[in-house]
Image: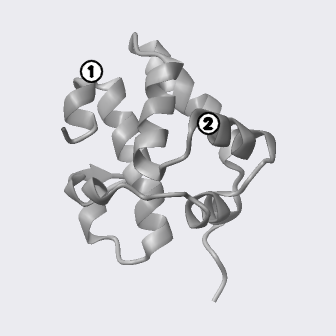
Amino acid sequence: MTKHKIYTMRIASVYPHYVTKAERKGRSKAEVDEIIRWLTGYSQEQLEEQLEKQTDFETFFAQAPQLNPSRVFIKGVICGVRVEDIEEPTMQEIRYLDKLIDELAKGKAMEKILRK
């Protein structure tokens, strides 16, 4: 079985789109970074290193220092699919990230996005 195309996409190629989406709605790159760090456990330096290394999504999530246990509380629909119903782990992690960025762009408070 072939891997889904998104697994081999470099996070660095998608990251600017996350930032642009957030900034168009008055949010910041720092907030995007905070969301990614919260989800994955990467430090800011580690995140920047992953972006510089052109790491693909599959490797990015596989090497994440500490996936946040609270990510299971992320619910809702992204790309027409409920994130909590996605069975393939890597795809679910990618969609969790997409959902969090969507919540940021929709103006949700960071405390709620980060499930505090």
Provide the secondary structure element on which disc 1 rests: loop
**76 or 58: which is nearer to us?**
58
**Mark drawn on residue 15:** 2
The reply to whether the C-beta atoms of the residues labelled 1 and 2 are less than 8 Å apart is no
Q: Is residue 68 above or below residue 100?
A: below
Quadrant in which residue 73 is drawn: bottom left
- Identified by mark 1, the residue type is Gly
Q: Is residue 3 above or below residue 50?
A: below
Which quadrant holds the C terminus?
top left
Side (left or right) of 41 relative to 10: left
Of mark 1 and mark 2, the one earlier in the sequence is 2
**105 or 112: which is nearer to us?**
112
- Crowdedness near tag 2: few (<14), some (14–19) or many (≥20) residues, C-alpha within 10 Å: some
> Residue 19: percent from the left, percent from the top?
54, 25
Provide the secondary structure element on which disc 2 rests: helix
Residue at 19% over, 33% down: 112
- Identified by mark 2, the residue type is Tyr
> Residue 115: percent from the left, percent from the top?
21, 42
Q: Is residue 59 above or below residue 32?
A: below
Which quadrant holds the N terminus?
bottom right
Q: Residue furthest right?
A: 53
Q: Residue furthest top?
A: 26
Quadrant in which residue 71 is drawn: bottom left
Question: How many badges with numbers are in the image?
Answer: 2
Quadrant in which residue 87 is drawn: bottom left
> Residue 29: percent from the left, percent from the top?
53, 20
Residue at 36% over, 35% down: 102
- The residue indicated by pointer 1 is 107
Disc 1 versus disc 2: distance between alpha carbons? 19 Å
Side (left or right) of 66 relative to 56: left
Side (left or right) of 88 relative to 20: left
**116 or 100: which is nearer to us?**
116
